[in-house]
Image (cartoon, rainbow, N blue to C red):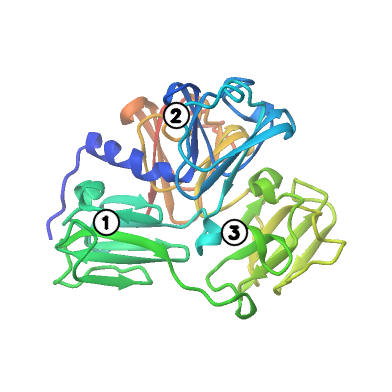
Amino acid sequence: MSRKIISWAILCFLSAPLLAQNHVSLYDQCNYSGRKYTLEAGTYRLYQMKIGNDRLSSMEIPSGFKVTIYENDGFEGRSATYTSHTGCLETGWRNMASSIVVESIYANQGYGPNDYVTFYNDCYSRGYSQSLRPGTYSGNQLGNLKNNLSSFTISGNLRVRLYINNDNLSGYSATYDASLSCLPDNQNDKVGSLIIEARPVTSPTGGTGGNYVTMYSDCNYEGNGLRLMPGYYPGDKLGIMKYNISSIQVAPGLRVKAFINNENLSGQSYTITDNMNCMSSNLRNRIASIMVEETGYNNNNNNPTSDRVVIYADEDYRGQSASLLPGTYSTMMQAGFIDNALSSLTVPAGYRVVIYEEENFRGKSYTITASKSRFYMSGWSDKTSSIAVYRD
């Protein structure tokens, strides 16, 4: 099939609403107006909230997220929990939040917060691409992917159900549990709508399935859950699971190094290679940071890695950060980050990042294919205003 040419404007328009499902949005005025700030799953003290003290007035909370706001810093005082969009906080809570907890319940739905599918309009993962989180997508929501889809890659414990020649998620469909390099002729360029959902996994006694470690706040694999792929997870990446892990499932081929009472991946640690339905007292509720490794894999690079590009405001992977799925972000606000603040980033193998000095992908650009702890030689520190992430 011939390659389609999609303008940057259409690309940006489609990227924003479909990738916005992996974070909550905070506003300092009612009706989702005023200054906007985005937070992924995690715990946020007063100095981490972005929006400032006693400024929160409304919130956009996607399906699968829960937000708890606290009257005082350090998650103390009165609290209130919200699970859906809130156009204006009630009088007793408007402009009263001083710390926030954002929870993702994806793990309880059979998939993790890092799971997504990237679709392409050409075979062999070529052409225009768009990453979508789990959910249902009618023809209108697919935009330029409607009747223009030829291949896809699945990242995580997901399956794809494609509806052929139908925009409304009905009629003849085809289901795939693995990535596909090219759709058969009777489906190629004929997908009008689709569903992305969890792929069934075995029960806790039979293992987790997939390339994941899954942790739970309670014994017997119950309570809040968090699913992690191989990578480095300091305390701030564990969110509410920090000091709150009681049981764990470890997929075959993985091992976990759990650091006790240390949030920075150092000090006393304990290696876990098998499922634990209830941790002993020397581990339970004492794990503050985690390293997930593939068995037999020796990584001599101490830089943090994950299945997503992570950008940082300070050198050496420090300061405010944001995790980015493949896609295009015409402004740094769209990426949940500060304009002209990018100083270091981690780039997993197989990923490519292009940064631009102006919004809407204008001005000078710089292509990056490996993690950079600083931009000492290139002179790009604190100069990025838009960014594109590709999975090659």
Instruction: Give the distance between the C-alpha atoms of the residues marked 3 and 1, in whole angstroms.
Output: 26 Å
Question: Taking 30 as reference, is 351 above or below it?
Answer: below
Give me the residue at 66% from left, 51% from top: 233
Instruction: Give the distance between the C-alpha atoms of the residues marked 3 and 2, in whole angstroms.
Output: 32 Å
Furthest-bottom residue in view? 206
Name the amino acid type tagged 1: Tyr
Question: Which residue is label 2 attached to?
Answer: 87
Give me the residue at 52% from left, 31% from top: 342
Furthest-front residue in view? 91
Give me the residue at 67% from left, 61% from top: 216
Q: Position of residue 203 (x, y in %)?
A: 58, 76
Name the amino acid type tagged 3: Leu
- Residue 327 vs residue 322: left or right? left
Question: Taking 52 as reference, is 366 above or below it?
Answer: below
Q: Position of residue 246 (x, y in %)?
A: 75, 61
Question: Which residue is label 3 attached to?
Answer: 228
Instruction: Give the distance between the C-alpha atoms of the residues marked 2 and 1, in whole angstroms.
Output: 35 Å
| Disc 1 crowd, CA 10 A, few/some/many (<14, 14-19, 20+) | many
Question: Which residue is label 1 attached to?
Answer: 120
Cβ–Cβ below 8 Å for labels 3 and 2?
A: no
Q: Position of residue 2 (x, y in %)?
A: 12, 56
Quadrant location of residue 173?
bottom left
SS for dot 3: strand
